[in-house]
Image (spheres, rainbow, N blue to C red):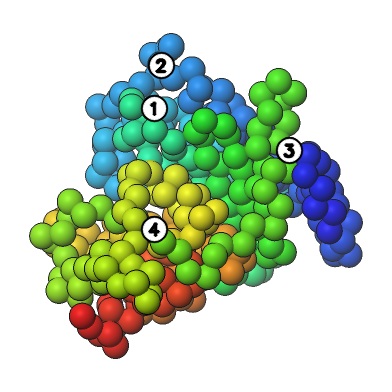
Amino acid sequence: MDQRVGITITEHLLREQRESPEATGAFTYLLNELIVAAKVISREVNKAGLVDILGATGDVNIQEEQVQKLDVFANRVIIERMRHVGQLCCMGSEEMADLIEIPPQFPKGNYILLFDPLDGSSNIDVNVSIGTIFGIYKTESPDTDFDFLLSEVLQPGTKLVAAGYFIYGSSTIMVYTTGNGVHGFTLYPSIGEFLLSHPNIRIPEKGKIYSVNEGNYRYWDEKTKAMVEYFKTKDKETGRPYTSRYVGSLVADFHRNLLKGGIFMYPADLKDPKKPAGKLRLMVEANPLAMVVDQAGGYASDGHGPVLEIKPQELHQRIPLYIGSKKDVEMAEAFISEKLTL
């Protein structure tokens, strides 16, 4: 594949399409429409301080979290942009309890889009990087009847055909994979195009950064406490201590570690009895990022095994997440499974 820095995302997608004999163009069209939705969201994020789209709406979403105004906007943009493309049989959003039906006036296809419209939205008001996470599956049967879709949607991450994220920060960047490596594109506002800026991203096998909300320390079990202490303990031979970096936007912490190496962790804790399995959502957050990091040479685990191999039981299932450089995640996994102790 041509990895020339500066080629457009459209050209990149078309080149991938030409290299796949069975490609019909439907998938390329689908991704192009998602990119347009991200451009619209990026524009609104960049002027958030100038218009009345900051702050909470007063509503609570399916995750029992305060809904931010930009959350609502981003969710609506993606749904309205994607429902008419003719390639989707349904969608699923982190913001909505049920699957999103494709209206009967629009044609359907065999792809399923799952997304977190605005990850890290609690940071909007303080101008911290936020993002959109997405994963795309394909139905395993030709039937696109909405009544039979939930079983089609609940596929393990190994079945993803594409995944990625858009990060809205000092610049807007799209990182994605279709199972043929990981590539990053930066939006150039003056021409309105995403241009290839990070070809064939590879995460270092071992990093020097750990990312975790240590404010939850008192709610962790002893295995988790020991694991974090390991990363903080000085040991010249193993390159410790690690540097602590935690933004509080999953997509921002993940993106930094993908480029520089390290581990992001959101362990299970006892802080909220309603969420004993962890906070992050398997289908719309963990699986897409797990596919990205896997394709970049890293690893994602729930503490006991690969995230991508988990068979989901429900649309909004939560899991613990350890994701990043392969050796760092394997080390965390060893602590959680009690194969290693301090």
Which residue has dot 2 on it? 49
Q: Crowdedness of circle 4 by 10 Å Cα count: few (<14), some, many (20+)?
A: many
Question: What type is the residue that disc 2 sits on?
Answer: Gly
The image quadrant where one finds the C terminus is bottom left
Are the residues at dot 1 and dot 3 in contact (C-beta closer than 8 Å)?
no
Residue 195: image tag: 3
Q: Which residue is mark 4?
A: 209
Place of residue 42 in the rendered image (x, y in percent of width and height, measured from the top left): 55, 28
Q: Is residue 225 left or right of residue 164?
A: left
In the depicted structure, whether residue 197 falls above or below residue 36: below
Secondary structure beneath label 4: strand
Which amino acid type is shown beneath numbered disc 4? Ile
**Mark 1 to mark 3 CA distance (whole Å):** 24 Å
Are circles 1 and 2 on residues that touch, CB within 8 Å?
yes
Q: Are marks 4 and 3 in contact (CB under 8 Å)?
A: no
- The mark found on residue 127 in the picture is 1
